[in-house]
């Protein structure tokens, strides 16, 4: 008998299920291969009412949706009964927003759930038709908590306790719990820092297979989907720019220097960056400021939304302990975890180059977070920010150190990165 593939829950599933009884459409957007189709199918299987699942990669179904979307519902729906219509890869449909609106307005007892792979397509061609008619959610590759779920359910329970204690430190200024099972957490964290959280990658333990899967995702998603869809003609420059960005993660982004290196213009680099942002490859982080003249306001910092894909771009899957870019990977990891948790994040940097990696704005307060791979002494950035903004709590994220310090009335907690 063929062994059934295990399906891992995504945290966003509970949020989606909570809205199933409402009239509004539910849209899931995110990069290819992060699990949007699987998530739709999980909810589909749990839905007891009359339902149908449609894949818009199929030409005949796509043509019907484009020419007469009402007929799709009429074919499967029973009279006076609630009907759930699941649509995968909606961006394949021409004028998809208009078609979804027609179904929504025509049938009061039809619930639509759809997925889409590009934020830019959805934003330009679909979402304008769905104002007031849809709730949109973003799905990313597995975060560290979801990654642990695939590795060790016991460690997952411990992680959740440590993570919750850190959240209470940030939100309510409680003290974080001391660590346990450090070596096991560190081993898994280092794996995640190299291979990231794409679902297909997590299903295998073999290093060579992980590399092959990530290279394939890079090839199909970057070289074909993005370059082909957006009609990028100077493909070599686009790919070269992506490699340059991958080497500069966790750093300030200079569009001028990239344009110069590529021998192209400033606006072309901006165009490429916009495409990479809306296809969930990168994220640009803005600086924190409160109208202080000494702070830089324009330059953004660069992060990748999956470290496995980032390492595939530069073809470097060397073990974490032997990497010169370990500090940048760790900072990128911290960003990604804070970002997907929904925190409002910025970085802080003055013209004197005093810097804090992340500033969280929570409940009217600010919490500075600094990431240190090796040297975990408190730097002048912490002292400068604390003197200026008087936060009650600050966090120093390390690989494996745990402790407590103080500057004036600010409590500073050192916590391992696997608390995130």
Image: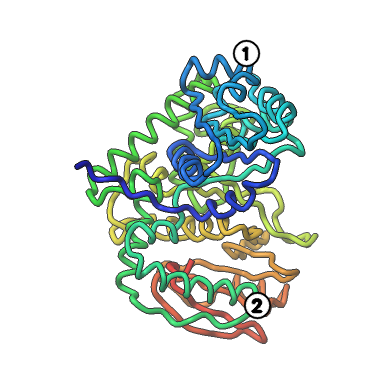
Which residue bears the numbered disc 1?
67
**Colouring of the image:** rainbow
Which secondary structure, mark 1?
A: helix
**210 lies above or below 341:** above
Q: How far apart are the two marked residues, 2 and 1, measured between alpha carbons?
A: 54 Å
Q: Position of residue 285 (x, y in %)?
A: 61, 51
**73 lies above or below 298:** above
Q: Position of residue 160 (x, y in %)?
A: 47, 70
Please give the name of the residue rendered at 37% of the width and 56% of the height, measured from the top-left corner: 192
- The local crowd at label 1, few if under 14, some if 14 to 19, many if 20 or more residues have their Cα within 10 Å, is few
Tally the marks. Answer: 2
| Quarter-of-image position of residue 115 | top right
- Viewer-proximal residue, 191 or 234? 191
Which secondary structure, mark 2?
A: helix
**231 lies above or below 326:** above
Question: What mark, if any, has residue 216 been given in the picture?
Answer: none
- The local crowd at label 2, few if under 14, some if 14 to 19, many if 20 or more residues have their Cα within 10 Å, is few
Q: Position of residue 378 (x, y in %)?
A: 53, 77
Name the mark nearer the viewer: 2 or 1: 1
- The reply to whether residue 273 is visible in this rendering is no
- The reply to whether residue 402 is visible in this rendering is yes
| Quarter-of-image position of residue 68 | top right
Q: Position of residue 231 (x, y in %)?
A: 54, 19
Considering every residue shown, the one lying at the far right of the view is 291
Please give the name of the residue rendered at 42% of the width and 60% of the height, measured from the top-left corner: 327
Q: Is residue 145 left or right of residue 214?
A: right
Considering every residue shown, the one lying at the far left of the view is 1
Please give the name of the residue rendered at 75% of the width and 36% of the height, measured from the top-left corner: 131
Q: Earlier in the sequence, mark 2 or mark 1?
A: 1
Please give the name of the residue rendered at 62% of the width and 49% of the height, measured from the top-left corner: 300
Considering every residue shown, the one lying at the far front of the view is 79
Question: What mark, if any, has residue 172 been given in the picture?
Answer: 2
């Amino acid at each position: 008998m063929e062994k059934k593939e295990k399906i891992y829950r995504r945290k966003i599933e509970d949020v989606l299920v909570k809205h199933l009884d409402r009239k509004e459409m539910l849209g899931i957007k995110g990069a290819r291969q992060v699990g949007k189709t699987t998530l739709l199918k999980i909810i589909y299987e749990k839905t007891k009412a009359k339902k149908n699942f449609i894949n818009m990669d199929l030409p005949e179904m796509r043509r019907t949706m484009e020419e007469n979307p009402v007929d799709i519902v009429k074919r499967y729906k029973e009279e006076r009964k609630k009907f759930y219509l699941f649509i995968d890869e909606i961006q394949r449909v021409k004028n998809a927003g208009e078609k979804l609106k027609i179904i929504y307005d025509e049938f009061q007892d039809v619930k639509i759930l759809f997925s889409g792979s590009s934020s830019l397509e959805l934003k330009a061609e679909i979402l304008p038709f769905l104002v007031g008619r849809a709730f949109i959610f973003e799905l990313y590759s597995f975060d560290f908590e979801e990654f642990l779920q695939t590795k060790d359910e016991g460690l997952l329970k411990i992680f959740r306790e440590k993570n919750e204690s850190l959240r209470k430190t940030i939100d309510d200024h409680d003290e974080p719990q001391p660590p346990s099972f450090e070596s096991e957490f560190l081993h898994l964290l280092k794996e995640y820092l190299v291979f990231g959280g794409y679902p297909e990658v997590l299903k295998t333990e073999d290093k060579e297979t992980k590399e092959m899967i990530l290279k394939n995702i890079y090839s199909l998603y970057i070289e074909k989907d993005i370059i082909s869809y957006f009609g990028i003609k100077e493909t070599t420059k686009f790919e070269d720019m992506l490699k340059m960005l991958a080497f500069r993660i966790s750093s300030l982004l200079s569009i001028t220097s990239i344009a110069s290196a590529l021998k192209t213009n400033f606006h072309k680099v901006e165009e490429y960056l916009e495409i990479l942002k809306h296809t969930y490859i990168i994220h640009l982080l803005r600086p924190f400021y409160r109208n202080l003249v000494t702070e830089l306001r324009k330059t953004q910092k660069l992060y990748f939304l999956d470290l496995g894909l980032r390492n595939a771009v530069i073809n470097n899957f060397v073990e974490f302990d032997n990497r010169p870019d370990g500090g940048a990977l760790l900072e990128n990891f911290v960003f990604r975890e804070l970002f997907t948790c929904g925190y409002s994040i910025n970085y802080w940097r003055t013209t004197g180059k005093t810097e804090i990696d992340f500033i969280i704005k929570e409940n009217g307060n600010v919490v500075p977070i600094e990431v240190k791979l090796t040297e975990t002494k408190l730097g002048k950035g912490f002292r400068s920010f604390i003197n200026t903004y008087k936060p009650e709590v600050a966090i120093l994220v390390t690989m494996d150190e745990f402790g407590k310090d103080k500057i004036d009335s600010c409590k500073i907690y050192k916590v391992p990165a696997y608390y995130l």
